[in-house]
Amino acid sequence: MTDFTDSLKPRHDGTATLQAERGRSSVDVDELARHLLSRDGFLQRQKKVLAVLSRVKLFKKDQQMNLSRPDRYHLALARAKALQRIVRKHGWDHDDYKMCEYLVDEMSPFHLHMTMFVTTVREQGSEAQKRHWMPKILDYDIIGCYAQTELGHGSNVRGLETTATWDPAQKEFEIHSPYLTASKWWNGAMGRTATHAIVVAQLLLPRSDNDKAYDNYGPQTFIVQIRDKKTHQPLHGIVVGDIGPKYGYAGMDNGYMLFDHFRVPKSAMLSRYAEVSDATGAFTRLGHPAVVYGSLTFVRGQIIMHARLVLARAVTVVVRYSAIRRQFRDRDSTSEQDDEMKVLDYPTVQIRILPLLATTFALHYTGEMMYSLYHKSRETIEKGDFGPLAELHSASSGLKSLCTMLAADGIETCRRAMGGHGFGGGSGLVGINADYLSKPTVEGDNWMITQQVAAYLIKKMTEAVKDPSAPASDPTASLFQFYLANRDHRIPQSPVQGSATDDQAIVDVFQWRAADLSYRAYHARVVEKKPWTRLMIQLHNLSRAYSEQILVTNFCNSFSSSSSTLSAPTPAVLRTCFRLYALTTLDASASSFTLTNAVAPHAVPVLQDAILDLMAELRPHAVKLVDAWSIPDWLLDSALGRSDGRVYEDLFDRAHRRNPLNGVTFNVDWRSEEIVLGSGDGGRGILAKL
């Protein structure tokens, strides 16, 4: 519609404001972007894929929030199928396809097929099984999902109730759901999409001395067809469907599934690391029991690596918007002519935003570490050496818990920091906020999986106490040995002295706190033999402290390479980010640092002034730092976070011109049952949808 508003402009020019912000900093954005995102040609791939997808109407985003949840699944499936055609048309590889999913920014019904499903078959299938299944998977002849979580059990995989009972006469497994709570639940792509599933079930084998009794050999993985490929209807003996509305992931068909004595061939059990003998029914384990959780470890690693980009999106929006948004004059202003202050210049806004900006970089360097650790560990495991499993499982568990907490809480903090407009669809945070709420609970609840980290650390400390002089096998063992040798004469550190900040002292206090809390947990459990359940809160705090020292250590270690590859002032700005992340984390948990003798009590009160100084140092560079994350406007889909600063023009356009609700005239007279004026519908349209 055309009206007088077409000629109105905002009072302040957002484009000029962002240009001025960028002019305040001499950080080389392109150089920093290459430093952050050069692995696997990320930036070039993003540009290539974006040029194609942004021209396809099916991938337009401006109306998807107005769609109903069933319509969102229809759209998501249409997009998933279209992506397969586009990838094949352009000859793109799997990394290109992952970039497509990143830019479309929607949990695709095909997503689990090429993550957990294919990973499980690739890592746990025998050579014969892989020869049979991998071509079908890679060609999308079948669509797979991962059916582990149940209605009654999520994090406790050993407590799953679905059974797979071996029938020695028929040489088959009978998969069964003995209770309602055995229903597979929450499994993505299972509701309406998948034709096959990796089903995790308790393996029950007849006893040799009594074939009416069974021994439980724990959870094993089975590849099971669940729908007919032609009719797409559930196979006989299977009940499966979509669980319904939920927070976020509107396009994903999270499902439920139950089995009624459903029979599958012996070849259904993935047998690279475990087998059942045809002749005797005996169970043979060919590898470490934890390999059954390999897909979970893979996904946790992916979540850790993705956390930086998710948080960076929210921080990009809030930094750009807060640099444009103006509210109130400075209280000390003496002139009525003074402009209102930029919101980003208020310390009460900075303390919420700038530490999160710093956190994106902390997450980045640990994400890169996790990428390296995962791939090196998998290479070792593929050679039959399962030694790295414990460290990989511990690191992925603790970091998944910490990183998803930082990102999920950070997104919400960004939303609130933007005031009322942060609540609207034009913020660009509605979808990402709702979708990311799942991450602190999926693939291991953030409180439960930290127990695995604590168990690993107690074991490592026990080994260090028994033999303090043994050669250190890894950095954790070395840290614990150093702690044991120095704990009786520890001198608490002061990371901030006057106007100077000691970076190595920062790393030392984080590592010392983690070691001391590990020793306390060891002493409580091993020496005092306290019940595990009573220690769970203490152990969760230990995991968080240990994971925080990983972030701090990796961030500090990055300076050895970034200082030599980045031009001034970027290395100094990144060092400011490191200090801001570390000191705000330290300040938030000051009692933990002082009680563990890591930090001197007199060093705590000076932290707040140091943090204010660091925020003042970082403030001029904020806009350019978020620019370096290279998040396209097409992906942000945010009026508030537009790279050109046209915030208010976009907000008004979305409301006034693009909102479909404004194109309908309603009958609001309560005496009439008509809803749309002049339609005579009598409310039948809405009644039909109830």
Image: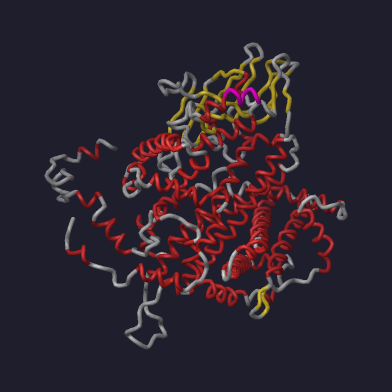
Residue found farthest to the bottom: 334
Figure check: 182 above or below 337 = above
x 71%, y 18%: residue? 277
Magenta span covers which residues? 127-132
In this picture, residue 633 sits left or right of residue 672: right
Quadrant in which the N terminus is drawn = bottom left
| Place of residue 681 in the rendered image (x, y in percent of width and height, measured from the top left) | 16, 39
In this picture, residue 681 sits left or right of residue 65: left
| Place of residue 545 in the rendered image (x, y in percent of width and height, measured from the top left) | 66, 58
x 65%, y 48%: residue? 372
**Residue 397 in magenta stretch:** no
Image quadrant assignment for residue 588 = bottom right
| Place of residue 564 in the rendered image (x, y in percent of width and height, measured from the top left) | 64, 64
In this orientation, does residue 590 appear? yes
In this orientation, does residue 413 appear? no
In this picture, residue 32 sits left or right of residue 68: right
Q: Magenta stretch mostly in which secondary structure? A: helix
Quadrant in which the C terminus is drawn = top left
Colour option used? secondary structure
x 48%, y 23%: residue? 238
Query: Relative to the observer, which residue lies in front, 2 or 76?
Result: 2
Figure check: 472 above or below 243 = below
x 52%, y 21%: residue? 260
Image quadrant assignment for residue 340 = bottom left
Query: Relative to the observer, which residue lies in front, 43 or 533?
Result: 43
Count of marks, rendered view: 0
Figure check: 152 above or below 345 = above
| Place of residue 504 in the rendered image (x, y in percent of width and height, measured from the top left) | 71, 68
